[in-house]
Image (cartoon, grey):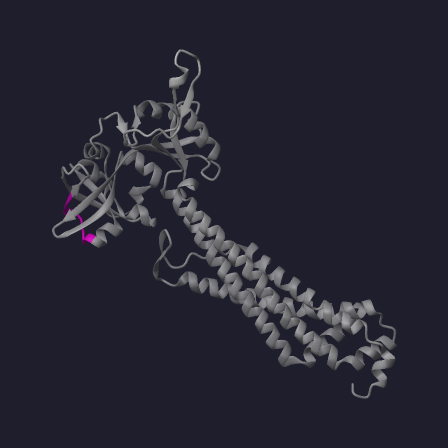
Amino acid sequence: MLKTLFDIALRHLSGRRRQTLTTIAGVAISTMVLITTISLTRGLLDSFVDIIVNVAPHITLRGEKTDPVPVVLPGLAGSDGTAIVEDNIKKQEREEVRNYRQIEDLFSSSLYGREVLAVSPYVESQVMAVKGSRNEPVLFKGVDIEREDRISGIGGKLQAGDIGVFRNTANAVLVGRTVARDMKLGMNDEIIIIPASGKSRQCKVAGIFFTGVNAVDNGIVGSLKLGQIIEGMPSNKVTGIALKVRDPLNNGQLALELQKITGYRAMTWQEQNASVLSLFTRIGYIVFSLVAFVGVVSGFGVANILVTTVFEKSRDIAIMKSFGFSAMQLVGMFILEGFLVGLAGAIAGGVLAIGSINLFASIPVENSQGPITKTGFSMSQNPLYFFYVIGVTVFISTIAAILPSAKAAKLEPVKVLRDSSL
């Protein structure tokens, strides 16, 4: 009986070939667009996370004290009463980590040696970079280059220059590609670094790097000693300490523990990029909402062809019921038709989506995708997205067949066959 219903369903669909093919094409195109959109959105997010995890510190220990200061209230003088002042108005002090080498020893101890893979102290300073008549406000970062290389892999991201030359050249700097382009900088060019203190330093370009992270590529890297001189810091102080940990995707608890032990604010890369990750999340919700809306539109197309089929095949349906086909069998037949149309369109859309994804991924155009810069579009080819969209499309197409099938099941054979207008 199932084979008979299947054959009849195929005859119904092939009998209105043009309408059936149009509906399948509509489902296919909507499926292709949705899969491609999800692939682009998720690909951008995956690419961003991958680049950030490989370039940026997983945890950053900043020179911001977390312990509030306990004080004795004036009205409680001579008593044991105390209070905690959290937002005390006081002289603005710059953020700095004191005696950072002791904290480094803690990270390399047996207590955290397995969790913390690399440690890099740094000094950050907002400076003005000047070359001739060109000037650019940039973020200067002073680092121990060997340690920084273990955090960000900057040595492998140099488009020009060499870390060895940087290490052996006095006042040498590595310049981000964005700064180099804006200021027309090349290898061995002389630039002047002017900090907020006003005491300028003449530096030499020893390398140009490109990480793909726009915020990093719009900066300048120098030695840790040079950074301390520019900021006027003694040798035992730094702005912060960058950490690379064993599990960067699950580092929240470790950050909290390090914050309690050191007394300095510990921020994960997720916290530092929370606004960007939140934006990606919102975009994801919008895209998945589109899946539902476009699926509903595709369902209307499937329902339309089945309603037309019920109207045109009323006599055939009446005859089938006269021969003993039950109402449930007729409902199953029309639901099968909706399933076949949705399946054919969804599979065709999936095949088209593979082609469109590969096409976008192969376009050799450098583009700035939000906070990162890449050559070509970041496209994800996760099979789950294909199964999700195809499954939703087929499900909606099948559900859309319920109304026409219910109408067909309610037809009374005697009344239909007596009506000469049908």
Q: Does the image show residue 221?
A: yes
Specify the quadrant of the image occupied by residue 232: top left
Q: Does the image show residue 1?
A: no
Specify the quadrant of the image occupied by residue 258: top left
Q: Report the front residue among 87 and 280.
A: 87
Classify the position of the C terminus by image quarter: bottom right
The residue sitting at the top extreme is: 78
Image coords of residue 326 (percent x, y): 85, 70
Q: Report the front residue among 264 and 248.
A: 264
Q: Is residue 58 shown left or right of residue 140? A: right
- Name above or below for residue 171 compared with residue 332: above
Does the stretch in magenta take in 396? no
Specify the quadrant of the image occupied by residue 70: top left
Q: Report the front residue among 142 and 14.
A: 142
Does the stretch in magenta take in 184? yes
Q: Is residue 190 shown left or right of residue 350? A: left
Q: Which residues are magenta?
A: 183-192
Image coords of residue 5 (percent x, y): 78, 71
- Residue at (83, 78) in percent of width and height: 318
Image coords of residue 399 (percent x, y): 69, 64
